[in-house]
Amino acid sequence: MGRLPLEGITVVSLEQAVAAPFATRQLADLGARVIKIERDAGDFARGYDTKVDGMSSYFVWLNRGKESVVLDLKSADGLSALKELVSRADVLVQNLAPGAVERLGFGPDEALALNPKLIHVSISGYGRGGSHEQKKAYDLLIQCESGMLSVTGAPDSPAKVGVSIADICAGMYAYTGILTSLLSRSVTGRGDVLEVSMLEALGEWMSQPYFYAEYGGAPPARSGAQHASIAPYGPFEASDGTVFLGIQNEREWAVFCAKVLDRPDLAEHPRFSSNSLRVENRGELHEAINAVLSGMSAEAVTAGLDHAGIANAQLRDMHGFSQHPQLLERNRWRDVESPIGPVRSLIPPVTSRELGFRMAAVPALGEHTGKVLAELGMSANTR
């Protein structure tokens, strides 16, 4: 393992659910000390499910490598402990309800007055100010408000993205923003105040369909597993299963027709001779393609696509992903310790020749309270 890039950085996080924990877990992977402040009942993500041998799949995913400290922030002792932690920290991350961190006395101005080198990070649904500031914001609701559901799903019914995409993208922008501010602080010596709104984070990811609709006059159609503006692109039926493929340009279309379908004439068909025409005549296009592929096995189709240099994929479920040969061949899985024993986890997706990462244990609730308070010179009864 190489040097951990964030060794010596301390992060205090008033976090819950997904967005902030996703950001801080990545900091922990890079070597930062992440002190997670929890209530007596714990981060409510601990109770989202019990699928990992009694532990929440969300919590296991989001909280490895952190120290769990239980503090009663309604008590003077709890606030005193938090004040001492913030005064020593490099980063404070919070995604409490709007206004809650200010009511605790740790808003941006108060926190930076206490610690001028602090990077203060707030993640919220809609951001400070504006008519939606106090509106509750959950992942599905931000998918709705950002227009995500308008372009996702089948033509007759929208569908949510199957992962917490609004939380994840907000967490990613918080994570990258923190890294940027740490770089800036190394030059200026000053702290910073960062704000990430889930709506604005997911809105950035929605910019392509925004431009398409705003300047094209009509929104992209919901097209299920098909691509809204490229054809052929999506699932096609072989004799014993489904194969996904994608055509990116006219050269690939001609190669696909000649080498995979053995129908070079289709490339110049007046209804299929350009991408816009293929999208317009998608139903007829799919009939012509499926007429050939339905007589071939999925294995034969993918072999032909690979030989022709046409992008393709299998539709894998979670077990199929878990056993993906590429991940196994590249040794991308590690065991992470947890209160219920080792859990098999993916290593961070960015690997470096020079810098290392760590995948430390998932903490039990309050596991590190006594240790951390002792470092502050406080009794373990101070909570």
Image: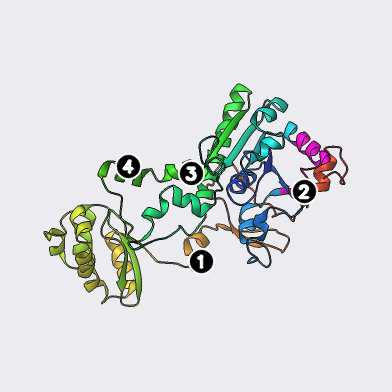
Q: Residues within 10 Å of mark 1 (few under 14, many from 20)?
A: few
Question: Which label was assigned to residue 199?
Answer: 3
Q: Residues within 10 Å of mark 2 (few under 14, many from 20)?
A: many
> Looking at this rendering, what residue extends furthest in the front direction?
131
Mark 3 / mark 1, whichever is N-terminal: 3
Q: Nearer the viewer, mark 2 or mark 3?
A: 3
Labelled pair 2, 4 in contact (Cβ < 8 Å): no
Q: Is residue 108 left or right of residue 158?
A: right
Mark 2 / mark 4, whichever is N-terminal: 2
Q: Which residue is rendered at x = 65% and y = 52% of the image?
A: 63
In the picture of the structure, the residue carrying the numbered disc 1 is 318
Q: Quick one: SS at disc 1?
A: helix
Look at the image and give the residue range highlighted in magenta: 67-85
Residue type marked 2: Val
Residue type marked 3: Leu
Q: Is residue 223 left or right of residue 29?
A: left
Q: Is residue 46 magenta?
A: no
Mark 1 / mark 4, whichever is N-terminal: 4
Spot occupied by residue 3 in the image (x, y as percentages of width and height)? 64, 40
Question: Which label was assigned to residue 211?
Answer: 4
Q: Nearer the viewer, mark 2 or mark 1?
A: 2
Mark 2 / mark 1, whichever is N-terminal: 2
Give the spatial CA distance, label 2 vs label 1: 34 Å
Q: In which quarter of the view is residue 204 placed?
A: top left
Q: Quick one: SS at disc 2?
A: strand
Question: Which label was assigned to residue 70?
Answer: 2
Spot occupied by residue 320 in the image (x, y as percentages of width and height)? 48, 68
